[in-house]
Amino acid sequence: MAARLQPGDPAPDFRLLDQHGNEVGSSDLRAGGPVFVYFYPKADTPGCTAQACGLRDALADIAGAVAVVGISPDPPARQARFDQKYSLGFPLLSDADHAAADAYGVWVERSMYGRRYMGIERSAFLIGKDGALREVWYKVSPKETPQRLLAALAG
């Protein structure tokens, strides 16, 4: 597992497929300004749906101040169904080999019902246009994710 990132660290670059099968790179996203990247375990599960819908609902308050991007190990087709079902309206990227999750330090050993496995630790990162991390939230709750983004943009 990669070391935990801190505000001020350079954000690791990534190039992944979105829900439409298009290749999207972190530097492409930053060209328009700051980027909010959040990692979630699995599309269309209760926590991930609450998180994504909360961010969708916050898009009006953000008003173009930041691009929102979700990343999970799900394949693009599953990401597309998730996007369509909830009208999310922002890129969902497929990190099937978890290279981006590794680089951000969110591919970790998890445990559920006594079973240990590797998976995504729900986390979020606000990346400045310069490529440096402005804010870092490991183990962020689904409901807190949009609130933290809005507070960081206001502050």
Image: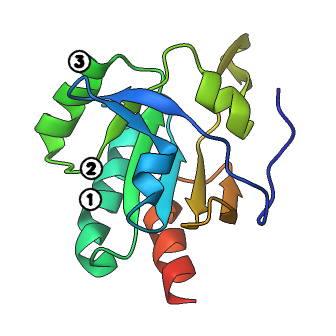
Q: Secondary structure at mark 2?
A: loop
Residue 114 showing in the rendered view: yes
Q: Give x and y (percent) for residue 46.
A: 36, 38
Q: Residue type at mark 2: give it.
A: Phe
Q: CA distance from mark 2 to mark 3?
A: 15 Å
On screen, residue 19 above or below 88: above
Question: Residue visible at 52% across and 64% down?
Answer: 144
Q: Mark 2 touching mark 1, by CB under 8 A?
A: yes
Mark before the other along the chain sequence, 2 or 3: 3
Q: Which residue is mark 3?
A: 77
Whether residue 155 sits left or right of residue 138 in the image: it is left
Q: Give x and y (percent) for residue 104.
A: 70, 39
Q: CA distance from mark 3 to mark 1?
A: 20 Å
Q: Which-is-in-front pick, marks 3 and 1?
A: 3
Q: Is disc 2 surrounded by few (<14), some (14 to 19) or many (20+) residues within 10 Å?
A: some
Residue 120 showing in the rendered view: no
- Viewer-proximal residue, 40 or 27? 27
Q: Which mark is residue 43?
A: none
Q: CA distance from mark 2 to mark 1?
A: 8 Å
Q: Mark 3 touching mark 1, by CB under 8 A?
A: no
Mark before the other along the chain sequence, 2 or 1: 1
Q: Which residue is mark 2?
A: 90
